[in-house]
Image (tube, coloured by chain):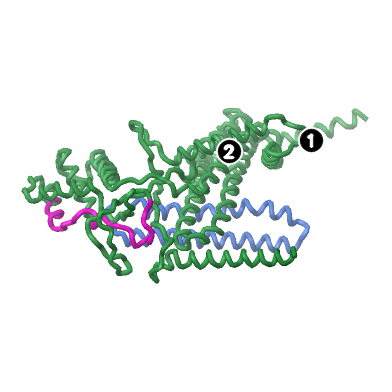
């Protein structure tokens, strides 16, 4: 009886997996070519810079900051509960933390010896923070739940950015335009040159339409673009002439259409079908949560802290002069004068390598997950999720390990160690006959 | 940048990650091969080899990741 149940449950599992696979194959991007893409979703906005959720004055609070706060709270809470009622023989949460600590303590001892023992708690903190920050980005809500930025907001944000860029760097546009004309010129340039595509949302403005790529609305379907008029407006503004009445009316109409931000006409999708989305609002999805390590600012701060800690370890072990002698020293021969600046450049290279190794791995993983789940909706991301779990732990471990290795390298003493040990060894040998 | 044609951007991104991944793949392959050789000569050193191979592999991958970051920056940020 139990064997029958086991065999049946195996069959049920296989059949379920098969059904999910077929659904995902037909519903995703591959099925769209045959007109069946019912489970596809629009390609979300991928940007290297983190998207801002709101801004307080000049400070932009981005979604990676929110995730970082959450991961920090998680680490501190776990650490708090692990240290209540500590037992001699650990179990549960305390055991987990002791495993991590022991791993880095043994690594530190094997690499650096006694000089590194003060560094181990800091290294463990780096490891835990990076692992948590990587894993929070893999939660189901990260990357898909967010707020919708309307077309008007995107346009104004883009325009203000470019106006500021031109105002700070006056070599881009060489004529003297006042503020309003500059805005108009930038508007026209954005309308002509931008190939950003948008997503149409349903009437409540919350859920995007399925059918993925087919629904990506380009700017020409939101604002009626009249290329001739736009080009002539641009030429007139660059020459400094006033605009004609017709051109000004056109600009007013364009502003109104930007303000509305709806699809104004039917268009043809890349597959050649007409897509009818008139009257639907367009926008872009800005996710609320994004892994904190996909923010170059965060990884750069971690890298700067790490290199600072390495320098401090070196200075604490060797003294200021002793450590500085690694870079500039006139007493160690001619070759050392040439090698010293190269060592300094090596320190700067450490900052860059720390930053980009961590950032690149996690960000590339995010893009990989998004594109895989775009191709095969339910199953495509599974093996890559496993890879992401592995990579998250591995990169944090490598960061911490490299801190240990570089600190032990910084704290070791090239010039005197060989001679010092040799002298000690000789003294030991000289002492022996008198004691006997 | 609006001045660079889009096709040149995409070509640059493709070449960047292509050459970067080529170097990394060859490097990791050589490391793995030497590890297998060492394992074959001395099967008792399995734990030591497994522990110490992670670091060289991560270093070899890191350069490919730098190339990937450059290609992402080329495509998405001008």
Q: Which residues are magenta?
A: A207-233
In the rendered image, which quarter is residue A417 located in?
A: top right
* Colour blue, chain: B
Task: Characterize the local packing of mark 2: few (<14), some (14-19) or many (20 or more) Cα atoms within 10 angstroms.
Answer: some
Secondary structure beneath disc 2? helix
Q: In this rendered view, identify the residue nearer to me: A349 or A369.
A: A369
Q: Position of residue B40 (x, y in %)?
A: 73, 64
Q: Quadrant of the N terminus of chain A?
A: bottom right
Observer-nearest of B49 and A297: A297
* Residue under pointer 1: A425
Relative to A274, residue A370 above or below: above
Q: Nearer the viewer, residue A134 or A350?
A: A134
Q: Is residue A342 visible?
A: no
| Image x and y of residue A390, in percent | 59, 52
From the top left corner, tell me how far across and down residue A59 is, in percent.
Answer: 37, 33
Which of labels 2 and 1 is toward the front?
Answer: 2
Circle 1: is it few (<14), some (14-19), or many (20+) Cα within 10 Å?
few
Tint applied to chain A in the drawing: green
Residue name at image x 46 percent, y 55 percent:
A370
Disc 2: which residue: A126
Q: Position of residue A117 (x, y in %)?
A: 68, 33
The answer to whether residue A222 is magenta is yes
Any magenta on residue B15?
no
State the residue at coordinates (53%, 64%): A20
Q: Chain of mark 2?
A: A
């Amino acid at each position: 009886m139990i064997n029958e149940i086991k065999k049946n449950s195996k069959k049920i599992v296989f059949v379920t997996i098969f059904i999910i696979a077929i659904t995902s194959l037909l519903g995703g991007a591959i099925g769209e070519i045959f007109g069946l893409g019912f489970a596809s979703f629009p390609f979300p906005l991928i940007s290297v810079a983190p998207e801002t959720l709101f801004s307080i004055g000049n400070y932009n609070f981005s979604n990676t900051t929110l995730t970082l706060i959450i991961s920090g709270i998680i680490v501190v809470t776990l650490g708090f509960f692990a240290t209540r009622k500590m037992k001699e023989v650990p179990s549960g949460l305390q055991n987990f933390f002791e495993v991590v600590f022991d791993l880095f303590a043994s690594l530190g001892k094997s690499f650096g010896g006694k000089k590194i023992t003060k560094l181990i708690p800091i290294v463990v903190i780096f490891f835990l923070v990076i692992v948590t920050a990587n894993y929070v980005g893999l939660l189901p809500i990260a990357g898909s739940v967010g707020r919708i930025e309307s077309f008007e907001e995107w346009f104004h944000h883009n325009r203000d950015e470019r106006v500021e860029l031109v105002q700070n760097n006056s070599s881009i546009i060489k004529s003297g335009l006042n503020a309003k004309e500059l805005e108009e010129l930038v508007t026209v340039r954005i309308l002509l040159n931008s190939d950003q595509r948008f997503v149409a949302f349903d009437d409540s403005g919350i859920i995007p339409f399925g059918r993925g790529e087919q629904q990506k609305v380009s700017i020409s379907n939101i604002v009626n673009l009249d290329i001739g008029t736009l080009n002539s407006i641009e030429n007139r503004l660059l020459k400094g002439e006033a605009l004609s009445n017709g051109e000004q009316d056109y600009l007013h109409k364009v502003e109104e259409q930007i303000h509305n931000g709806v699809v104004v006409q039917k268009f043809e999708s890349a597959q050649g079908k007409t897509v009818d989305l008139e009257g639907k609002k367009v926008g872009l999805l800005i996710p609320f949560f994004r892994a904190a390590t996909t923010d170059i600012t965060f990884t750069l701060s971690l890298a700067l802290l790490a290199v600072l800690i390495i320098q401090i370890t070196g200075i604490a072990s060797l003294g200021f002069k002793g450590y500085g002698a690694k870079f500039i020293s006139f007493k160690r021969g001619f070759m050392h004068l040439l090698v010293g600046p190269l060592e300094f450049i090596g320190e700067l290279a450490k900052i860059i390598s720390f930053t980009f190794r961590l950032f690149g791995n996690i960000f590339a993983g995010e893009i990989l997950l998004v594109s895989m789940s775009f191709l095969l909706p339910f199953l495509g991301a599974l093996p890559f999720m496993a890879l992401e779990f592995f990579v998250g732990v591995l990169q944090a471990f490598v960061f911490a390990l490299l801190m240990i290795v570089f600190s032990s390298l910084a704290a070791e003493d090239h010039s005197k160690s060989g001679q010092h040990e040799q002298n000690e060894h000789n003294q030991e040998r000289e002492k022996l006959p008198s004691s006997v | 940048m609006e001045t660079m044609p889009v096709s040149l951007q995409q070509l640059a991104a493709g070449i960047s990650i292509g050459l970067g991944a080529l170097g990394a793949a060859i490097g990791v392959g050589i490391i793995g091969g030497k590890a297998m050789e060492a394992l074959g000569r001395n099967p008792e050193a399995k734990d030591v080899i497994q522990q110490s191979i992670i670091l060289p592999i991560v270093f070899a991958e890191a350069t490919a990741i730098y190339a990937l970051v450059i290609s992402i920056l080329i495509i998405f940020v001008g």
